[in-house]
Amino acid sequence: MFDLIIRNANLPDGREGLDIGVSSGKIAAIGKSIVVAAGEEIDATGRLVSPPFCDPHFHMDATLSLGLPRMNVSGTLLEGIALWGELRPLLTKEALVERALRYCDLAVTQGLLYIRSHVDTSDPRLVTAEALLEVKEKVAPYIELQLVAFPQDGYYRAPDGVSSLDRALDMGIGIVGGIPHFERTMEDGARSVEALCRIAADRGLPVDMHCDETDDPMSRHIETLAAQTVRFGLQGRVAGSHLTSMHSMDNYYVSKLIPLMAEAEINVIPNPLINIMLQGRHDSYPKRRGMTRVRELMAAGLNVSFGHDCVMDPWYSMGSGDMLEVGHMAIHVAQMAGIDDKRRIFDAITVNSAKTMGLEGYGLDIGCKADLIVLQAADVTEALRLKPNRLFVIKAGKVVARTAPRVGELFLAGRPASIDTGRDYVPPVLQR
Ligand SMILES: [Zn+2]
């Protein structure tokens, strides 16, 4: 007897028509037509069932603050940073907690149950760290929230950058951040990478740096990050977020850099929505895309996962907590439209992100946590194309969110009365 069984599910790897049995919050069986009773039964009717989405790069201290204390008039990264600097002294713990909890509600309905958020440690009050640590506790029953101590104004550049980051780690923030390209000089940037990797090694923590979020091809802190990762024995525990300068780097230099990154087992986290929006702003035409070299990094065996980064905050007025929107943008910006490419992109918002975040028990194997989503789509290609409704979101074997299928009613003579927006009009090659 199972607690829950999901019938007739299609899986991201292409297997179809399987049942998934859940017992004591874990996946207990996967197979065709399982003949076991269950406390609850969900008929997936040939829809995609996936492990939940994971966002490895977000800013939960800034989310939903759009318009506070004013709008970003130019829409640029630098005005965004300046605007956040204006808002920061006005932040209260209560308001931060309230906004973060509201975002987490949205995330759950989108099937997003794992989030890594950077937490700005530049203001020595550390009200951001206090608030997000409280949120982490509060949402733990439904979202696993990882926190990164992030010196937004520079580890060396901000007056209290060094001590504030240390105190945030003492408070219980579990990942070391950084922003080497924003330090005053290239040399300071390189020194910050070394100092922060040393802290991570001493404390036994992972590293996740905003690294080279610029169009400047000479911004090469990723090289230093890879070297220090190997030097301190942090292989596999270090993430390079953004890495947009790699888009503009010389190809010969990159041909040396990517193997160094592979040697250090750097986890690469591009943020397609934000990178395409904020980079290339000093260009006239042609305008660079400003996203790192996703296809080449994947081909070299690096673990690439995509982040959402921002939702309705000083940097980005859009966003919906939907990792399929992130994947959809990635397909376009990275020009990864092949059949295998789509699966790679879907992996980048699910299993690859789980690897970046070091999640345990994530996936669709027997014994994994029964964290599952049922989408109104038949496969990963359709999911990325449609960004469909999450019909069921399941955490530890319990339904935590449900959304009705999107069905359009028609009032046209001689035409059908309604269409399922996912499946009723697709070309024959995609019909099941
Ligand atoms: Zn970021």
Image (cartoon, helix red, strand yellow):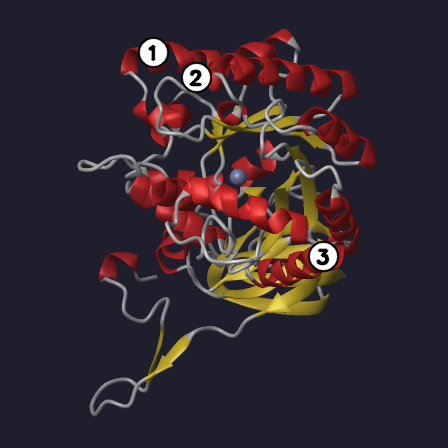
Q: Secondary structure at mark 3?
A: helix
Marks 3 and 1, the one that precedes in the sequence: 3
Residue at the extreme top of the image, as rendered = 231
Amino acid type at circle 2 is Arg
Q: Residues within 10 Å of mark 1 (few under 14, many from 20)?
A: few
Whole-percent x, y for residue 355 in the image? 59, 33
> Which quarter of the rendered picture does the N terminus lie within?
bottom right
Write the residue at 73% across / 37% down: 124
Q: Residues within 10 Å of mark 3 (few under 14, many from 20)?
A: many
Amino acid type at circle 3 is Val
Query: Along the line of sight, which residue is nearer the eye, 37 or 11?
Result: 11
Depth check, mark 2 against mark 1: the one in front is 2
Q: Which mark is residue 253?
A: 1
Residue annotated with mark 3? 97
Whole-percent x, y for residue 414 in the image? 20, 90
Marks 2 and 3, the one that precedes in the sequence: 3
Write the residue at 53% across / 43% down: 350
Cα–Cα span, label 2 and label 3? 36 Å
Amino acid type at circle 1 is Tyr
- Asked whether residue 90 is in view, the answer is yes
Residue annotated with mark 2? 220
The answer to whether mark 2 and mark 1 are in CB contact below 8 A is: yes
Cα–Cα span, label 2 and label 1? 10 Å
Image quadrant of residue 282?
A: top left
